[in-house]
Image: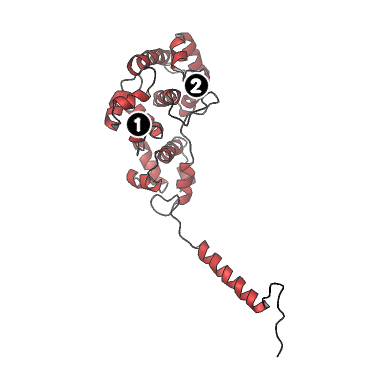
Amino acid sequence: MVRAKASATGQSPQQASNKRKRGDENDDREGRKPSNEGKIEGDQPPASKSMKATDPAPKSRTLDKRNESTPETILALVYLAMLTSARISHVLAYESVKCLIEAGYQDIGVLRKSSWQERTDVLTKGGYTRDREKTATALGELAEFVEKEYDGDLNNLVKRAKSSPAHVRKLIQQIKGIGKVGTDIFFDAAQGHWPCLAPFIDPRSLDTAKNCGLGSNVESMWEAVGKDPVEMCKLSSALTMVRLDKKEKEFQ
């Protein structure tokens, strides 16, 4: 009878083989573990993970604290609502928002001191040629309105509304240039800063969510992102971009 030679670890080849086999079986079992991460409705984690990765805040090197609820960030989100709700290409609208921020207009003081011509020129630079004169006037009126009604900080609006979404909706529409669609855009982007607005998905994006396999139940999506207003904000903004860029098929 021949004995198997022991390995350097003191194990016979047969013992080592059995150990490796058990390890492989454990790996297989771990590989088959179901995960709920990123799932919304149904088994569609790739779409939900990709969509939650989108940051809705206007990007600019002059808006360093865009992830914080500063007066500058909230004012920038108002610009986003005003310009992207107009009948203009969303690409030009986003570019114009970027130009407003680079001009320093997220600072209410800078906006207030700007001339009508300067505001018109900034909008022109961004490609916002439709109703630019009217919009330049509205921006000037916005500066006066925010300083008079909210001491220069729109965060005071949500305080006046006592964190009621219905009241916030009513007050935000007092801003010239923001109607129902603009309010939906603002809620989409601001819920990460004003948690009382969450959960919210722009009604126009619900079909997009359904077509991407996420369902159309806002409460289910809210549960899936852990009831995190920031994650809900990223998801809603991602759905908006998928809808605007007509990229639904990429997530099916």
Residue occupied by mark 1: 184
- Determine whether the residue tagged by mark 1 lies in a helix, strand or loop: helix
Q: Residue 29, position in %: x, y?
A: 51, 66
Q: Are marks 1 and 2 in contact (CB under 8 Å)?
A: no
Closer-to-camera residue (122/109): 109
Is 218 drawn above or below residue 42 in the view shown? Answer: above
Image side of residue 179 versus residue 252, left or right = left
The image quadrant where one finds the N terminus is bottom right
Q: Is residue 21 among what the camera can see?
A: yes
Number of residue marks: 2
Q: Is residue 179 among what the camera can see?
A: no
The label shown at residue 65 is none
Q: Residue at x 50, y 16 (%)?
A: 122
Of badges 1 and 2, the one in the foreground is 2
Q: Residue 217, position in %: x, y?
A: 33, 46
Q: What residue type is labelled 2?
A: Ile
- Determine whether the residue tagged by mark 2 lies in a helix, strand or loop: helix
Residue occupied by mark 2: 101
Is 125 drawn above or below residue 223 in the view shown? Answer: above
Q: Earlier in the sequence, mark 1 or mark 2?
A: 2
